[in-house]
Image (tube, coloured by chain):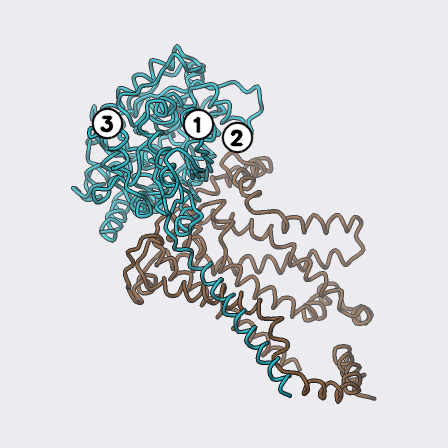
Amino acid sequence: MFHRSSSSTRRRAIVTLSATAALVATLAACSGGSTAGTGASSGDSGTVNWWGWTPDDGEANALIAAFNQEYPQIKVVYKKLQDASYNAALRPALASSSGPDVYDVAAGGATGDVATFGGSAVDLSVAMQKAHGASWKDDIYAAGLTDFTQDGKLKAAPVGQIASGFLWINQQIFDRYGVKPPTTLKEWVNACATFRANGLGCLAEGIGQPGFDIDTLHSIADSIQPGDFAKAADGTIPWTSPTIVKAFGLFKQLATDGILDEGAVGIQQYPDVNNAFLSGKVPMVQMGTWYQQYATKKALGAALEAAGVPSGTGLVTIVPIPFPDVAGNSNTPNLFGDPDYALAVSSRSKVVDAATTFALWVSSNKTGQQIIADHLTDYPAMTSVAVDWSSLDLVDPASQVPALQNLAKRVAQVDQSRQAKLPAQMIQALVTADQSVIGGQQTPEEAASSVQAAAVAKG
Amino acid sequence: MDHEVLAGPGVRAHGAAAPRRGSRGTGQKRARRGRPRVSGVPWILPALVVSAGVVYYCIGYTGWISTLRWDGISPDRTWVGLGNYARLFQDPVFWKSMEHTGVFFVVTTTAQILLGMAFAALLHSRLRLAVLYKVAVFVPVVLAPATMAPVFRQIYAPDGQFNKILDAVGLHDLTMAWLAKPATALAVVMSIQVWQSVGVAFILYFAAMGQIETEVLEAARMDGAGNLRVLRSIIWPGVRGTTLALITLSAIASLKTFDVPYLVTSGGPSYGTEFLGTFIYRMSIPQSEVGYGAAISVMLLILALGTAIVFNAGGRDKEIRRV
């Protein structure tokens, strides 16, 4: 009797203990770890896991290979994520102790915004000062530092800058039909009529995906009254101002006048429009400076291969042109730009020093920045670094080099933010408004009011 | 007449099993009395802990988050009580999502039932290459939506195959950018869902029809019943349980719909294909409003549970009335 009772008690105790242990383990798994990174590594050894939605693998591998020439003891593993799923992957990863050591952040928008993800990053300003001296800020793109600084702490090291507010054309298609780049609404309508008469589309844009439509709306607004869109974005004027209402109306007119391809609100910029343009099916698109990488044979070939375009397909000659003066007010819309991605170092990293070494090398070392510049995805964050055009293998250097150099000059004059000052809620409100106006569900006035309501709700 | 003959096959099985249980019953009871009652617990404990820990803890955690204004990562969490729920009921996108879910449920369920029954009835008749047809109907079930989404985006594009077919059959006036208008985009999403899930309905109906006694069908034929009468008066009542199960599953699937609208239309245009699932994702991930997203998740859970209870209760009532 005694024996049975003892055995039963022991069994109950084991059951209770194992239940408690399993429950604790489960709850710990659910709630995530809380161990902070020790930063016990040295600055020149360790394995650094880098997560980002950009750059492409080729550029990342080039950066890592060059970095390893100087720091052979630091192994960097790059994991490229889709921008649409980046936040979803990063949020739990940063809350655990097994997330990335270095991760991409953006100045604003819906992917990796520093306002959301900067809280998990260490302050890099001390390391910057240690590496480059007291004047470390002098050689770095000022907006890059401003936009990634929170409460006096540099939450991420800016890698480069981008700009938008212009169009990319397929020069071969324009040459084939003898069409000159349009500078006014009327010329644009005529150019598109020519392309459509020959069985082509004209301006392809994926308004089903937020972001690119906002660039178009911004350019249109700048052709009406330069600077008004930026003022609305920072709250100086309401979104219901006459310029923005008229901009919505002109955007709709691009669709009704045969400029914007049919079905724009039902397609995505990536991959739909991107693949169509790079494979030579579309005469023009609205993309930003990151697109100049496809002026090189290597990047364009890789993109076509990734898009499943048959090998042997001719390479398109892409050339940037100014956004036409659609309002007829003699305002050639200027460019607007933001810092592109920046590298943040996770405060939970176990290799904080090595991760910081890598982040700083990419963002503020001339070798790293030259690789960034020569890949043409970003303009380098260091103002003293410029593209080495002689090293690039472009599709058609005669037409592309002058056009790209001219674009660089215009980028240097950028004085308006692109979308860094727009929170994700405003980006969603703007794309919904664009879709509703073009789809005919809202008038320009109603669309402007809905955006203003979102701005008020956001505060 | 004994009880077995009156009760039919289901009861006969119970009747046959009862004496066997009775013959061992006394010994089993004695053995049970001798063992500690805890003996079975360790076997179910891991599953119990996992389900209680993972599922119910996380439901509770989501419920707690739904009372916060929080981006999901920041240490700053503001308690807002039921504020997120109050906001939810005033949010037009939430009501749009509910409306789309309702339309989606009615259309896709009706289509699944009609097509599933039609395919099952056809394949119960003597058909050449029946196996091939079965495979053709069922294959969409096993194809991943992520694989098929680009295909459907291409099919319904302005220069896609669907418009080309319309052109070819002289219906040029009907061609349009199907994904560019909220109403047609929703129709596209529903058509993809029907294409993908009709195979399940077909398999279930095919199996259920196999359970209907052939003698009953033959008797009906001898009494002069035609195909439609047999379908209405014998097959339809015979597969009532399957239909009820399909409706319940379809209701819950409609509430949880995410992959097709997310991959094909991203919930647009103008929220025209927004469902609760895409709404939760939009708020929680791109917009970093994790507290609000959690409130929508809790609402989804309540709706799914309510739906399951209502359909189950309804089904039970019907069964009781039939008896």
Mark before the other along the chain sequence, 3 or 2: 2
Q: Which mark is residue A307?
A: 2
Q: Is residue A166 visible?
A: no
Q: Nearer the viewer, mark 1 or mark 2?
A: 1
Judged left or right of residue B208, residue B85 is left
Q: What secondary structure is found at the residue carrying circle 2?
A: loop
Quarter of the picture containing the C terminus of chain B is bottom right
Alpha-carbon span between mark 3 and mark 1: 35 Å
Task: Say if B186 sits above or below A189 in the image.
Answer: below
Q: Chain of mark 2?
A: A
Q: Nearer the viewer, residue B273 or A259?
A: B273
Alpha-carbon span between mark 3 and mark 2: 32 Å
Q: Is mark 3 in CB contact (under 8 Å) with mark 1?
A: no
Q: What secondary structure is found at the residue carrying circle 1?
A: helix
Q: Which mark is residue A414?
A: 3
Three-letter amino acid code of the residue under disc 1 = Asn
Q: Is mark 1 in CB contact (under 8 Å) with mark 2?
A: no
Three-letter amino acid code of the residue under disc 3 = Val
Q: Which percent across, then down, holds residue A13? A: 54, 76
Judged left or right of residue A239, residue A375 is right
Three-letter amino acid code of the residue under disc 2 = Ala
Which quarter of the figure has residue B208? bottom right
Task: Say if A22 sits above or below A215 in the image.
Answer: below
Which residue is outermost to the left?
A: A236
Task: Say if A261 sits above or below A152 in the image.
Answer: above
Q: What secondary structure is found at the residue carrying circle 3?
A: loop
Alpha-carbon span between mark 1 and mark 2: 31 Å
Q: Residue shown at 24%/42% (left/top)?
A: A153
Q: Which chain is cyan?
A: A
Q: Which residue is mark 1?
A: A68
Q: Residues within 10 Å of mark 2 (few under 14, many from 20)?
A: some
Q: Chain of mark 3?
A: A
